[in-house]
Image (cartoon, coloured by chain):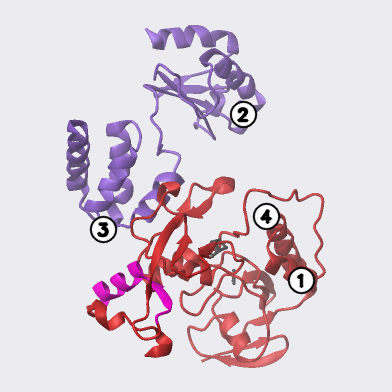
Amino acid sequence: MKKDKTVEKQVKEIVDRYGAEKSSLIAILQDMQGAFGYLPKDALIFLNEVVDVPLARIYEVATFYNAFSLTPRGKYLVEVCAGTACHVTGALTLMERLERDLEIRCGETTGDGMFTLEQVRCLGCCSLAPVMRIGGNIHAYLTQDEIPKILRNYRQ
Amino acid sequence: MAKFIIDGKKIEAENGATVLDAARENGIEIPTLCTHDEVGSAGACRLCVVEVKQGNRAKIVASCLYPAEDGIAVDTKSERVMAVRRLVLQLLLARCPGSGLIQDLAEQMGVKPEPRFTADTDKGKCILCRLCVRTCEQVVGVSAIGFSFRGADKTVGTPFHENSQVCIGCGACAYICPTGHIEMETTKTGDSRTIWGRTFKMATCKVCGRYFAPEDQLKYISRTAGVPLENLAVCISCR
Ligand code: SF4
Ligand code: FES
């Protein structure tokens, strides 16, 4: 009960930042994603009460963009680039190794809430291929043998 | 007034009219799935493609959106148009193999399922034209349904695919859907109907006693139109 109160309070604060208008929806959702790490269902339902946008439309936007997630994300987002340069230099092997080491499939979150594994199109640094990004840090010229060590560093 | 040519015929159309409007006005048929007078066009189904020639440029466009312009020459049945239209239908057929309407259209145009387009099994009859969503928003004013996710995962439905709190059970979406994707079931006695997973109690007409509209819909009309609920207790045939 108490927890719900804070969710509502947080949503209200975010809405106040941008105004309760339809045109602010994406900015609001971005901040909510940042604050909660994902878009909790009750937060979206509450948002519908304070912003004049139908819940069906909010749900549309929330599910359309990859930047939003409806399920909790881990502390670190692991993004494996699948752009052309990374693809041809072995992004698939990286993904396989990560799936094996983290014991999750692409798109899932580890049981300890540390990592969420995702594939992205292009991180914009093709000359460093193959790359992955963990919690915003780029790891360049990767080979799969380096993965256990990198993950261990983040776990500490 | 825009003066132009469709299938070799000189035509005049009002400003703001689309090529499709002008064609229909002049008895030229163009197949469509996703345009409707009440909610307009969205260019989603692409069945209405035509070829527009302007000077020495020719392009394939959606006639339901393309404005009738002075001096263009439109072809609605050229070989190029028919090839595109058959491909569109081919893809629609692969997405919705179970839709009778699309099967009929395909047969009329001599389109047969092609092995290179693997038929979908999980899309139902929905072609993602958005007519139902636009109707719920613009005509009913409720916005109970929308699309979710995108690309191959895109589906139509209520938020979180759960019972909608705002749906009034009017059935406008099921009525407007060109392919019959949306299921609405009414009990034998007619005392309730189920749509989008939610069951609505039906109200009886004060005069003839027949079930005629969901209670929630009457409440909604009463609230938005400011009419007392009692005034809505009689069905259309008894009014
Ligand atoms: S359910 Fe019907 S009306 Fe709605 S988007 Fe799908 S095909 Fe179009
Ligand atoms: S009717 Fe024009 S795209 Fe569907």
Query: Is residue B223 inside the magenta stretch?
Result: yes
Q: Is residue B86 above or below residue A148?
A: below
Q: Callout 3, which amino acid?
A: Asp
Rendered shade, chain A: purple
The kind of secondary structure element at disc 4 is helix
Q: Callout 4, which amino acid?
A: Arg
| Ligand 2 quadrant in view | bottom right
Q: Nearer the viewer, residue B113 or B199?
A: B199
Q: Total of numbered circles in the picture?
A: 4
Residues marked 1 and 2 touching at CB (< 8 Å): no
Specify the subunit that label 1 lies on: B
Q: Is there one chain holding both mark 4 and mark 3?
A: no
Specify the subunit that label 4 lies on: B
Rendered shade, chain B: red
Compute the Cα span from label 4 to label 2.
32 Å
Seen in the image, is B6 located left or right of residue A16? right
Q: Which residue is mark 2?
A: A85
Between label 1 and label 2, give the one nearer the viewer. 1
Q: Nearer the viewer, residue A135 or B89?
A: B89
Residues marked 4 and 1 touching at CB (< 8 Å): no
Q: Which residue is mark 1?
A: B82
Query: Is residue B80 inside the magenta stretch?
Result: no
- Is the residue at mark 1 in contact range of ligand 2, meaning its CB lies under 8 Å from it? no
- Is the residue at mark 3 in contact range of ligand 1, meaning its CB lies under 8 Å from it? no
Q: Which residue is mark 4?
A: B95
Residues in magenta, as a range: B209-225
Q: Nearer the viewer, residue B113 or B196?
A: B196
Which picture quadrant has residue B181? Answer: bottom right
